Image: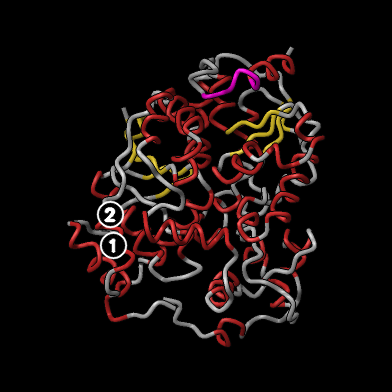
Amino acid sequence: MERMALFPGCLVLQRMPQYEKATKEVLSAIGIRVENIPRAACCGAPLESFTDRWLYLAAYNLSLAERMGLEVVTLCGNCTNTLLRANAALEDPSLRLEVNAVLSPMELRYDGKTTVKHLVQLLVERLDEVRARMTSRLSLRVAVTHPCQAFRPHEVSGFDDPLEPQAMRQLVASTGAEVVDYLTEHDCCGATLYLGDRQLGLEAGRRKLASAAGADVLVDACGNCQLLLERFRGFLGDSHERSRLVVLTLPQLLGLAMGIDDAALGISAASARAIAEAAA
Amino acid sequence: MNERTMDELLADCTRCGLCREVCIVERLGGHSITSFLSGEKDYSSWLCSSCWRCQEVCPQAVDIHTIMMLKRREQAPPAGHEANLVNVMRLGYALQMEDDINELRRFHGLDAVQFIPAEWVETLLRGDMTRNQEDR
């Protein structure tokens, strides 16, 4: 079986084992075994606003994957963007020397041999294999929210349309579900904004959920989106609490179409019931 | 690392306002770095959803992200960002990582994870910087 290194990121690691679990199930179904990177740390993103040492942390994580000899799969837009930009910055030989001087006491070395791919990119590149594993067609209306930082800046990600990405739509369409257009599809969820201003962050999330409310399911592929749109749902106001829109991560939806059990995908009983009712 | 000065970074900006037009913060009534780029004084470099849309649409390829990062190092951070910073500097993670995470993982049928050793966090983030670089 093909092996890859999984970099879930702090949010998924601490709060969303469901997303990681569904990812492992779906990737395993298409013949990829992902392994967590022992001793991996934060990607470095939260440091960048304060110190240039964000790059040391990013390079540290990449060097661990390099030592495993594996490509990295990410689950969060923010980690993807940070690790990709670190790889780009470390093409500069002087920075690479500096970073390797810091890594050497840990017997680690950054040589730039590891590629970083967000789960959406990995899956869409294997769309035929994903399709081949589908066992049923989902009779659902699905709205998609894209992990914005996995596509931008395009000069670094080199993947998909940076302003109107299509990959997630293609993946959702492969389940037989109807991909629903909605006004705020390409707007950010608000999770990072929440760190700077709670009210503005929640308002971004509220608008997204309200705009997607005509769908049965809203699908995301980022720890930040999942945090704001699903976990913070209680803060987003009454009308949305009562909305029947179920928020799932992409591998959870794909897993359903592959006939993988709800529990194995980390889908709660309440969400599973709502999905079954919507599909009926 | 950001070797360019603010003046150099801003040199190609024509104040066309496209960045501000696509900014979700501005649409929600806040004032982000895109207000600064449009010549306004009332803005916060911390009000950002990190969506990178402004930089992607900039016809002049202005490095808005780096401009924002430089500005952030001059403006006091909001509590949420500061909390993440403190956690990363102390633990190597943005959030608290206790051993109960591995219990939660076991419950979900996931293998236990190994955390970064504390002394490596020290080496990476708090040790002397090579080339005697000062944190900005």
Depth order, front residue of B56/B81: B81
The image shows residue A73 at horizontal and vertical percentages of 42, 42
| Residue B122 - label | 1
> Measured along the vertical axis of the image, is residue A262 above or below residue B37?
above
Number of labels in the image equals 2
The image shows residue A87 at horizontal and vertical percentages of 39, 60
Q: Is residue A42 left or right of residue B29?
A: left
Q: Amino acid at mark 1?
A: Glu
Q: Chain of mark 1?
A: B
> Measured along the vertical axis of the image, is residue A95 above or below residue B5?
above
The image shows residue B63 at horizontal and vertical percentages of 57, 73
Query: Extreme bottom residue here?
Result: B7
Q: Chain of mark 2?
A: B
Q: Disc 1 and disc 2: Cα gap in Å?
A: 6 Å
Residue appearing at x 64%, y 58% in the figure = B49
Query: Which residues fall within the magenta stretch?
Result: A266-271
Q: Amino acid at mark 2?
A: Ala
Q: Locate the N terminus of chain A and report the quarter of the image it occupies.
A: top left
Q: Which residue lies under the disc numbered 2? A: B118
